[in-house]
Amino acid sequence: MSDHPLFEAHPGFAFTGNPLERESEHRGDAVWLAAHRDSAAARFVIFAEGRVLTVKAGSAETEFLLERATADALGADAGEMVLLGFRNHDRAPIFAAPLARNVEDLEAAHPEFVAIDLRTLAREGRVAPGHLGLLAQASSLLHWHATHRFCARCGTRSEMTQGGYRRDCPSCEALHFPRTDPVAIMLVTDGEDCLMGRSPRLPEGVYSTLAGFIEPGETAEEAVRREVFEEAGIHVGEVTYMASQPWPFPASLMIGCHGRARSREIVMDATELDDCRWFTREEVRLMLADRHPDGVKVPPALSIAHWLIRTWAEEGA
């Protein structure tokens, strides 16, 4: 973990506080990159089928930073390795690499490892908060490379450059950069009530904040108002920014907001939501404590949705 003032994990949700110094100004130097990739100090995060390869151990914290020899033995391709950055305390370069191997076969061949998905790592709390940010960075970058191997302009297979932060087309010379998709996620309130809904993707009984992708030519505030009106028929007035969260499923930035309702009547979009309703502050407190008489709940604490809900519910408590 880093004590650098730029890198501070948010205490309310996961995937923040990435402790790595990125040193983006050096990424274009292929010799510099190769020297760090081959350094004895280098450590590697290995992903297989979207899951992190971790060392089986009885320690309280899951170990996932592997030496180069281990990465090579597992079959990591040097040409697919992405530079994440440098640890602040010892300047060790940290890379991420994908394995094109079936997880079941991989674990059978290497029983000392187990592949774990990011949600499980975050939910179980076995990875330091800042290291979850590091894993979010790795997962999002590797997913982008896996799904953007060909030039969107001419269709030619592109080449990874800039340490993994660009793909160049050798044919038409187009440059392609990793995507981060902005999402507005908002808790809308009216006095002592808040608006929450159930999308088909949520576990049974879970209600959450509304959310939606920010569209081109739209501010975050406008996206909040549009999404809430489209999904619930509620008009929103004042919108306040609260916090943001990297969400590596696959590569979003959740922009957390609080909106104040200007209307009350819900007109739900049944194609987006299974249910939508107003909850009192006391009801939400019961949901947070898992004591609501109807058995309804809020999302887990790893999400910014949970933090937005809890922050409002605890006001004046």
Image (spheres, rainbow, N blue to C red):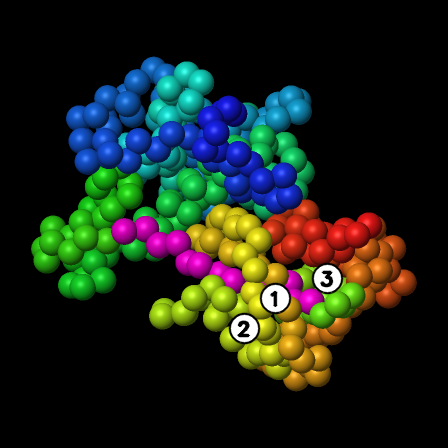
The image shows residue 307 at horizontal and vertical percentages of 66, 50
Q: CB atoms at circles 1 and 2 under 8 Å apart?
A: yes
Q: Which residues are magenta?
A: 177-189
Name the mark on residue 56.
none
Alpha carbon distance from label 3 to label 1: 21 Å
Q: Residues within 10 Å of mark 3 (few under 14, many from 20)?
A: some
| Mark positioned earlier in the residue sequence (3 or 1) | 3
**What residue do we see at 23% from left, 48% from top?**
167
Quadrant of res 66: top left
Quadrant of res 138: top left
Of the residues shown, which amino acid type is indicated by label 3?
Val
Residue 215 highlighted magenta (yes or no):
no
Name the mark on residue 225.
2
- Can residue 116 be seen by looking at this rendering? no
Name the mark on residue 206.
3
Name the mark on residue 259.
1
